[in-house]
Amino acid sequence: MTRYNTSRPMNRLLRITLQIALGFGLMLLATGCAEKATDRYAHIRAFLQFRPVSASAPLLSAVSNQGMFCTIRIGTSQFLFTGPTGTSSSWPITDVVRNYGQPECVAGFVVGIASTPDLNGQMPLLAYDLACPNCYAGDAMITKELTLSGERLSCSRCHRIYDLQSDGIVVSGDPGQPLLRYRSVVYNQANDLLVIMN
């Protein structure tokens, strides 16, 4: 009578099953990490196309120099650009902008380059919304504009202070959500053009 060893095929099948399960688990873990990495960006629509950047000293300084930021407020008839020292300039909102490139945001924008490199050693141009994210998210979409001071934004309503060079995290006041950061911000010097999109 011939005896077959049935334990070897079972052990091999068990090993293959465990390897597949482990591989699947690693894929899920990698996907989870990828989702967390993209969560630092706002999930709302935003758009701004502005030219000529060189017409606004605070904006030109912010897109050209590390550690400089500029707020962009959008009124009914003009853009208002304000630097960290309070210097400001305005530019009319033309019919072309109204008809073909109407800005979209919650309360405005803050644009600039942080004074310290990001984790990749880069100095990217950054754009955040000018609305306090915690007042906006927590209280039925209350839009409370933030005030710029150097590389920090502060909210007079909830008293949080946000750090622009650290992904907009709360650095003072109650813990909370970071600033609403927009994914794509490009300054094209040759065309004197700033574009923000999300």
Image (spheres, rainbow, N blue to C red):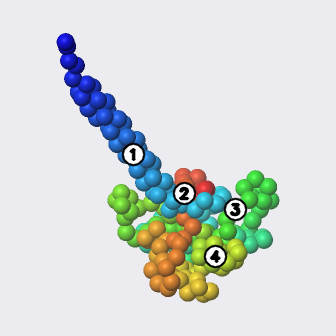
Q: Is residue 96 left or right of residue 14?
A: right
Of callouts 4 and 3, which one flags the residue occurring earlier in the amino acid sequence? Answer: 3
Q: Amino acid at mark 2?
A: Arg
Q: Nearer the viewer, residue 169 or 52?
A: 169
Would you say residue 163 is visible in this rendering? yes
| Crowd tier of the residue under label 3, counting other residues whose Cα lies within 10 Å: few below 14, some 14–19, many 20 or above | some
Q: Position of residue 155 (x, y in %)?
A: 58, 83
Q: Residue at x 70, y 73 (%)?
A: 141
> Mark 1 highlights which residue?
25
Helix, strand or loop status at disc 4 = helix
**Left or right of residue 159, residue 19 in this image:** left
Q: Is residue 182 above or below residue 7?
A: below
Residues packed near mark 4 inside 10 Å, few (<14), some (14 to 19) or many (20 plus): few
Q: Amino acid at mark 3?
A: Glu
The amino acid type of the residue labelled 4 equals Gly
Q: Quadrant of residue 72?
A: bottom right
Q: Which mark is residue 183?
A: 2
Q: Which residue is mark 4?
A: 138
> Quick one: quadrant of the N terminus?
top left
Task: Name the residue at 72% across, 55% down.
Answer: 101
Residue 194 vs residue 7: left or right? right
Quarter the C terminus occupies: bottom right
Q: CA distance from mark 3 to mark 2?
A: 14 Å
**Which mark, residue 104?**
3
Callout 2 environment at 10 Å: few (<14), some (14 to 19), or many (20+)? some
Residue 16, how many percent across, how many down?
32, 32
